[in-house]
Amino acid sequence: MVSEALIGVIAAVCSWGFFTTPMKLAPKTAPIVFQVYMSLGIVASSFAVLIMHPWALTLEWGAVAAAVWTTGSIFSVQAVADLGLSVGQGVWSGAVALTAFFWGYAGHAVFGGTAYAEAFPPCDMPHQTLAVCSLGVLCVGILIVSLVSDGGSEPEPAVASTEERRSLLSPGDAAFSRKAIYEIANAGGAGDASAPQKANKARGLACAALTGIFGGSVLVPLKMAPLVPFQHGTNASIFALSFGLCIMPVTLCFLALAYAGAMLGWCETPRFGAEHPLGRELLAGVAAGALWNGGNVASIYAIQAPLGMAVGYPLTQCALLVSGTLGIVAFGEIKGKRVLLWVLGAGILLAGASGLGIYGG
């Protein structure tokens, strides 16, 4: 069982480390639109679990898990757009680790007096203090990794004032046709762009934190599903089928809410293929969904004994190392001396993850 849990951790780290990469191929796609594409990838890939396990469904708990995850996933798309891979996944990895540890460690206290008390047994940690300290070290490493980048979104250029436009487009300027277009597009200094940049970063940090809270709670409905087969060791991975079949109806409900909000003037109308070619958006979303679902199935193995939810799920958040490396190497999100700081944070993160695995089991 130790080997199965560890293999689950490693597989989840790889899948979740890569799943955010396709988001960079369609960075301007509205989060709810990208979520629809991701849902298609999740639905299609969910049937793969039938290769290992017989058909079994628990649609009610699958729908709850789908609603929890879809909410977090929509926030994650915005977080990557505002902060980039290195920072976005760094922040929500820390939030996931803390949230999952809470459910695994304190779940019995929350559900102890309910019908689900048996699904959340008391968490027995022989080295409880060392395990908690290791979790703290892991979060410190994630915090360092998260703060070394300035974010993923470029500030939008400020718009020139009416007076600036008139002076630039003065007929007396013989070269106004080229000069005006360039200067209007770039009017305003860096100080003018700092406000929207800070606003985007604050929004991205909030979205990343919410992603982590929902993401760390996504397997709680699995613990509430019927004991057989969904609580029967690694056979619990068949839960991914219930989750996958429910994800599209839940996503469409969120899409309907987005259109209703647009009609009321609360948000922009979601548009498919508005910012990027439709095929490109679709391919990126389906790939992200399939990669995420692979990590989802692997995480079910990761939370099996002896690691459990309090240890196994936080360990899967080492996926940050994969996504962060991609952000640095492939997308140039972190440069210069900040790369060394990122490496330091990654080392602290690994030390915390190792301690959690050793003392939390």
Image (cartoon, grey):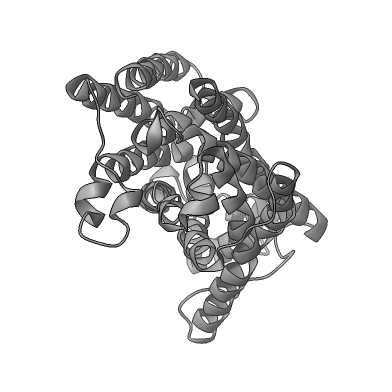
Q: Residue at x 52, y 78 (%)?
A: 257
Task: Looking at the picture, tell me which residue is in the foreground, 154 or 78.
Answer: 78
x and y, in percent, of residue 132 in the image: 22, 27
x and y, in percent, of residue 86 in the image: 49, 32
Task: Looking at the picture, tell me which residue is in the foreground, 332 or 39.
Answer: 39
Q: Is residue 4 left or right of residue 109?
A: right
Q: Is residue 222 left or right of residue 240?
A: left
Q: Residue furthest front?
A: 228
Would residue 361 be visible to someone looking at this image?
Answer: yes
Q: Residue at x 45, y 78 (%)?
A: 266
Task: Looking at the picture, tell me which residue is in the foreground, 158 or 271.
Answer: 271
x and y, in percent, of residue 157 in the image: 53, 52
Q: Residue furthest right?
A: 279
Would residue 150 be visible to someone looking at this image?
Answer: no
Q: Is residue 119 left or right of residue 69?
A: left
Asked if residue 332 is positioned above or below residue 187 in the image, the reply reads: above
Q: Residue at x 40, y 14 (%)?
A: 347
Q: Is residue 83 left or right of residue 322?
A: left
Asked if residue 52 is positioned above or below residue 340 in the image, the reply reads: below
Locate the C terminus by quadrant. Answer: top left
Total numbered circles: 0
Q: Residue furthest bottom?
A: 264
